[in-house]
Amino acid sequence: MASPSPSWVILDTAPRVATAAGELQPGADISLALAAPPRVTQLTVAPTVLAADPDPHADIDSPCVLAADPTGLFLVLAPPSVSERPPTEARAYRGPDGVERTIHVGRVPKPACFVLDVPSGAASRVPDPDFLNASTVGFQNIVGCDEATLICFSSEAGEWVEVDVDNPLPNWIWSFDGVVSHDGKLWWLIEWTPEHCVSFAEIWDSYKAAGLPMPKKKPPRVAFIHPENPDIVYFFVKKYLFAVNRRTKKVVESEAHEGRASSSSGVLAWELPPALTAGI
């Protein structure tokens, strides 16, 4: 009996640009090469979606999937075109040698925002909010202030929406790594309460039996927690992705991968829309 199709995949957050005919369906802007975990699913976009002349001075140097929704929508940030670079302002100054010189001062170009609709294969650019950069999006607050702003893109209205919310911990410095999506909500975590600790020494025999490379200078790096089984944690080591069951203290699966992903920011555990689960 065939095993049921997985309900989630490991998505590489770095989309690749199609370079050959036939990589995309006629009229489609995007495609997905779905792969069952622990293999990595690759997103491919048409060259017409992203800027042909990405600005090297933008505060993001390559496209990335910032968020993936179970309905099949991806929010993608990418370097804007050089032609969109904000104008510079000429300023004159006199150096220690008494010679007057002119410099041009300008703002760092902000990322371009795209929404990719995976079921339809369509991609569209969305308005670029003035406040957006590669590191602050979603929840914005001032340390010490009990109020904050929650920022989200409404696919229905086609615009960014700002919602005033309470800041439960005014003196806490929130970070992207402390946010998880669960049950249709965003949860900001301030502390992890250890319930079970496992050292790598305890799984070493299982690690070697799986044929994984010996870590030398860098230890394995956490990739993500299994979205349906919190006992299973995924790690990167060199070009391998492997999963450990923290209760049995064994490596339960592993796979070599060719993508650039090597840390938690390089992959997303994405819950598939029902229409896509049969495609694996």
Image (cartoon, rainbow, N blue to C red):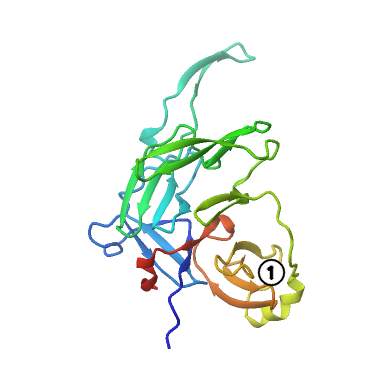
Residue 73's place in the image compared with 21, above or below, is above
Q: Quadrant of the N terminus?
A: bottom left
Residue ranking furthest to the left: 26
Q: Horizontally, is 189 left or right of 41 in the view? A: right
Foreground residue among 31 and 99: 31
Residue 176 position within the rendered picture, expressed as x and y whole percent measured from the top left: 59, 47
Residue 91 position within the rendered picture, expressed as x and y whole percent measured from the top left: 51, 16
Residue 238 position within the rendered picture, expressed as x and y whole percent measured from the top left: 61, 66
Residue 261 position within the rendered picture, expressed as x and y whole percent measured from the top left: 53, 60
| Residue 166 seen in the current view | yes
- Which structural element holds mark 1? loop
The quadrant in which residue 168 appears is top right
Q: Quadrant of the C terminus?
A: bottom left
Residue 19's place in the image compared with 83, above or below, is below
Q: Horizontally, is 101 left or right of 82 in the view? A: right
Amino acid marked by disc 1: Pro
Per the image, the residue denoted by label 1 is: 215
Q: Horizontally, is 26 left or right of 168 in the view? A: left
